[in-house]
Each structure stands twice: as structure tokens, then as C-alpha cells.
Image (spheres, helix red, strand yellow):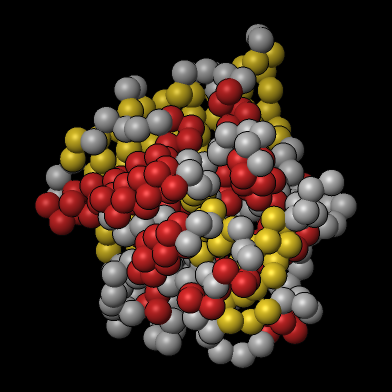
Amino acid sequence: MAEPIRVGLAGFGLGGRAFHAPFITANPRLRLTHVLQRHGHEAADRYPGVTIVRDVDALLEPSAAITLVVITTPNATHVPFALRAIEAGKHVVIDKPFALTADEARGVAVAAQVAGKVLAPYQNRRWDGDFLTVRTLLARGWLGDLQSFESRFDRWRPDIRGERWKEQPSRGAGLLFDLGPHLIDQALALFGKPRSVSASILTERPGSLVDDHFEITLEYGGFAAKLGAGMMAQTPGARFSIAGSQGQYVKHGVDSQEEALRAGKGPPAPDWGIEPSERWGTLAAVIDGLHVHGKLRTLAGNYGGFYDNVCDAIDSTAPLLVTPETAIDTIRVIELAQESSDNHARIGY
């Protein structure tokens, strides 16, 4: 068996601690050897044997012998850190958002291509159980011709946590760059590039210095994909609401993996990613002449599938499932959404 791929994790905030490290350390093809943590030693306490470094230079030192760098630092650092890692001869995973502009994203993609390195945007929610269910449902054509598609992340978080960089008015802060990449990436994975983009980006919470609510409409031929998120939803809307010529699917509640990860739980576990039945969506459809109505079991989610695919790409045994090109398209939609909101206009893609 080949030696595990040595991994350096840049960042040990919520993203690195909850959404990356558990899946890196659970994968036998990967070995977490170094963590860039500015302060404290939590990473070494949690993962004995890991070396703590305090800056990017130490992470990229030849003596560290790292093969893969995972970047989960504040958004504005993603591109400069990725370029330095690629220049140092490393494969790279970049947490969302991949970049803050489409031009920046293209620049990183070109650098990785020239260097012959794997560059993977971390879109873990491609492995949400509910998204996998929706993708399968649409692929089987159970809803008929699509008429409407709505996907949302609604939360009740009225308090402003001013100490968090995401709440400070800076490049890449705010809800659009936080949750927008997930919703947009999923829509593009299902339907491809839209014909046009229209959006409303708002600041709703009193005292908030960043956007905390958005509504984005991606227009396709014959239907529109409506994407939204907000921080003031005491009663969240449906996570997915999809209607077609033969039926409808409605799903409430978010994938259970995030809740478990925030609570300090992680893989491996026999029930990992399995959603309780009370969260299953409802399907009402006519399938092969049969009228079907009831709960549809949510497929098991597994964010670890992302890292399985990255390992395959590094080993040249399978192509990347989430490519830099799809990340560029996602950032382009964000740019068009900002332009649309500023000018109160529908913008062609």
C-alpha cells in the first residue's frame, strides 16, 4: 500500500477543526502532519503527533514534506496562500469561496495547470444527503419537466458577533460569500450555467456591517432556480422545494453532518450522514402511472467523499468531481448577483 499523502492544514477555526480535519484524519490515504494555527495548540491536543506552525512559510518548508495543502483561512487569504502553495509544488484544496473575483479564480487555476498540480475547490455540500437525494430524483425524472426549483439556507441568528471577521466590512465578508458558494455550486452542478442572474442582497439585522440576506434567481429555459439565505428567519423556509410537470418534492431541515461536526462528532461511525426519518422530504408524484405520496428516505451524506475523490485525482485514478472551472463559474454568479442587486436589473450570464 502506498504511503499516505502528507497534508498541511492552513487554519484551525471552525472550518479546519470541524469540516476538514475529521475527514482528513479518518481517511487512511491521508496523513495530517502539520497545522497552521496562529494561536494555541488545540490542533496538537486533538491530534497528537501533528506539528503546529505559526505561518505559511513554515507550512511550505521543504522539511515538512507536505504534498497537499488545505486552505481554510479567512476568505481574503485564499488566493495568495494557494498561489504560494502551488509555487512550492503542492497540490491544493481551497475552502469556499474559492476566490473573491472570477479573475483571481482563473489566475489560480492557470497556475495549478501550469504546475501540473491538483487544485480542488472544497464544495463539501455536493455530499449533503439531501442534495444527493435531489440529484438522484431529478436524474430519474420522477418530477417530469422541471417548473420551479428553490434552495435555501435560512437561520435565526439575530445577534451580531463583531469579533468574527465574517461580520467585519472587508473583502469576502458577509453572507453572500459565506453561504452563496454552497447554494450556487449545487445549482450549477444540477443545471449548468444560467441564462441570466438577478439578485437582491440586503443587510437586515440592526447594526450589521455586512450583508446578511440574499435572494438570487438563476434563469434557465423554462424554469428558474431561486436561491436564498438569511439570518432573521425564526421559521426557516424549505431547504428544497422543487416542482415539475409530474410532481413535487419538499424538504425541510439541513443535512445532519454539520450539526454533528459542530458538536465535536465525526467519522467513522456506522450511522454517519444518515438522516432521521422525521427530516425526510415529502414526494408527491405520478411515476410510471402510479400516484405516489409520502416520505422519501434521504440518501446518506458523507463529506469524506470529497477527500476520497481528491486522493484519486492526486493518484491519477479518477478526475476531480469539483473542478476549478466550476468554482470560477460560481464566483462569476456572485459577481453578477452583486451587479444585479446594485443596479436592480437582470444581468445576462
Between 342 and 149, the residue placed more toward the observer is: 342
Residue sitting at x 58%, y 23%: 139
In the rendered image, the residue lying farthest to the right is: 270
Examine the rendering and report whether any part of residue 20 can be seen. no
Q: Give x and y (percent) for residue 316.
A: 63, 36
Q: Quadrant of residue 258?
A: bottom right
Above or below, 48 relative to 320: below
Toward the front, the furthest residue is: 63
Q: Is residue 108 left or right of residue 152?
A: left
Residue drawn at x 43%, y 87% as measured from the top left: 163
Q: Is residue 208 left or right of residue 242?
A: left
264 on left or right of 203: right
**Residue 317 location (% of width, % of height):** 66, 34
Say which of 50 and 14 sits in front.
50
Q: Relative to 146, is 158 above or below?
A: below
Give the image location of residue 3, x and y in percent.
Answer: 78, 53
In the image, residue 327 lies at what x, y percent?
41, 46
Residue at 29% across, 75% down? 170
Q: Nearer the viewer, residue 96 or 89?
A: 89
Quadrant where the C terminus sits is: top left
| Vertical order, 192 against 140 (above or below) | below
Number of labels in the image equals: 0
Residue extending farthest left: 343
Q: Quadrant of residue 135?
A: top right
Considering only vertical position in the picture, is 309 above or below 273? above
Drawn side of residue 337 relative to residue 41, left or right: left
- Which quadrant of the structure image shows residue 82? bottom left
Q: Can you see residue 144?
A: yes
Residue at x 79% of width, y 48% of height: 2
**What is the residue that sits farthest to the top in this orientation?**
289
